Image: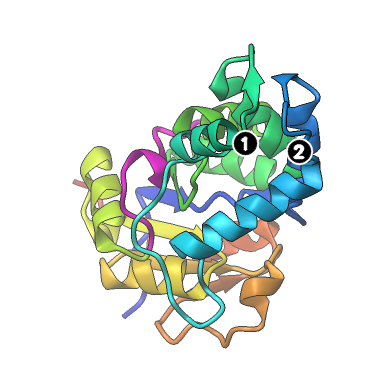
């Protein structure tokens, strides 16, 4: 069945809207330690990065190498709080500011090529937009980053799974987005890079998936093409052609 013309296009965050070519915990901890009021154990950024790796392995927080996909999110702020308290680090800065310092240093992002133009085009065509991101960082940190990197966006909502428990491909997070939009699945497209979380997850909810391959993470690029029916897009400049290929929305 041919896809319907969308009333709304939802986007993933990482490697879809924003390219984060690396995530370096040591650089993140260097930025945070520069603001420490006390570090009585003399922890280095490298030691703290290794400690975080060990905790995340124990929690199976981001385990994907063997095909396991976590369906529930751990919010970064209580995790960060535990790391700092257990290592006897103290700060005067608010924990939200420390979170942003860490993320900006560990994974500086840049808009994917052509996304500014696409967001303007969708707005001009009256197509609504929103975001669903599997993200442990706070929703406030995500919104601030998108406001800074994509100042022309008109996202109606930005769902960080840290704030809503359920991670893609859980249908619960997709259904929440549909509820917030007040739309049916066939009225929405979802663009993402991850074959399992984004493409299979959207498909399971009846949402038209668009596999964006323009900034694939090495973690996903080795995977096979998604099994579910989907549209594929390597360049945002080609998105208007996808819209033009589908039938125009029916007048009511």
Q: Percent x, y for residue 128? A: 41, 40
User: Which quarter of the figure has residue 246?
Assistant: bottom left
In-front residue for pair 239/195: 195
Pointer 2 with pointer 1, Cβ within 8 A: yes
- The residue identified by callout 1 is 87
- Quote the CA–CA distance across marks 2 and 1: 8 Å
Label 1: element kind: loop
- The residue identified by callout 2 is 43
Residue 167 visible in the snapshot: yes
Please state if 181 lies on the left or on the right of 29 as rendered.
left
Residue 151 visible in the snapshot: no
Mark closer to the chain start, 2 or 1: 2
Q: Percent x, y for residue 73? A: 39, 51
Magenta segment boundaries in residue numbering:
153-168
Q: Which mark is residue 220?
A: none
Query: How crowded is the residue under tag 2: few (<14 C-alpha within 10 Å), some, or many (20+)?
Result: few
Based on the picture, tell me whether residue 76 belongs to the magenta stretch. Answer: no
Q: Residue at x 71, y 49 (%)?
A: 49
- The quadrant the N terminus occupies is bottom left
Query: How crowded is the residue under tag 1: few (<14 C-alpha within 10 Å), some, or many (20+)?
Result: some
Q: Residue at x 79, y 42 (%)?
A: 45
């Amino acid at each position: 069945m041919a896809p319907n013309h969308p009333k709304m296009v939802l986007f993933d965050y990482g490697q879809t809207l924003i390219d984060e070519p690396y995530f370096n915990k040591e650089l993140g901890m260097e930025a945070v330690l520069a603001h420490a009021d006390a570090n009585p154990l003399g922890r280095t950024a490298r030691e703290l990065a290794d400690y975080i790796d060990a905790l995340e392995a124990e929690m199976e927080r981001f385990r994907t190498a063997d095909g396991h996909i976590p369906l529930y999110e751990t919010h970064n702020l209580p995790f960060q709080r535990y790391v700092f308290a257990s290592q006897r680090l103290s700060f005067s800065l608010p924990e939200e500011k420390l979170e942003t310092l860490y993320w900006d240093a560990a994974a500086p992002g840049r808009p994917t090529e052509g996304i500014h133009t696409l967001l303007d085009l969708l707005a001009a065509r009256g197509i609504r937009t929103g975001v669903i991101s599997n993200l442990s960082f706070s929703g406030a940190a995500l919104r601030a980053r998108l406001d800074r990197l994509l100042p022309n966006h008109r996202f109606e909502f930005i769902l960080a799974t840290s704030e809503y428990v359920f991670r893609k491909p859980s249908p619960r997070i997709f259904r929440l987005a549909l509820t917030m939009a007040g739309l049916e699945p066939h009225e929405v497209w979802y663009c993402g890079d991850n074959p399992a979380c984004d493409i299979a997850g959207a498909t399971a909810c009846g949402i038209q998936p668009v596999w964006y391959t323009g900034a694939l993470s090495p973690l996903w690029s080795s995977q096979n093409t998604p099994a579910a029916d989907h549209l594929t897009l390597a360049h945002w400049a080609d998105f208007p052609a996808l819209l033009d290929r589908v039938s125009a929305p029916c007048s009511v």
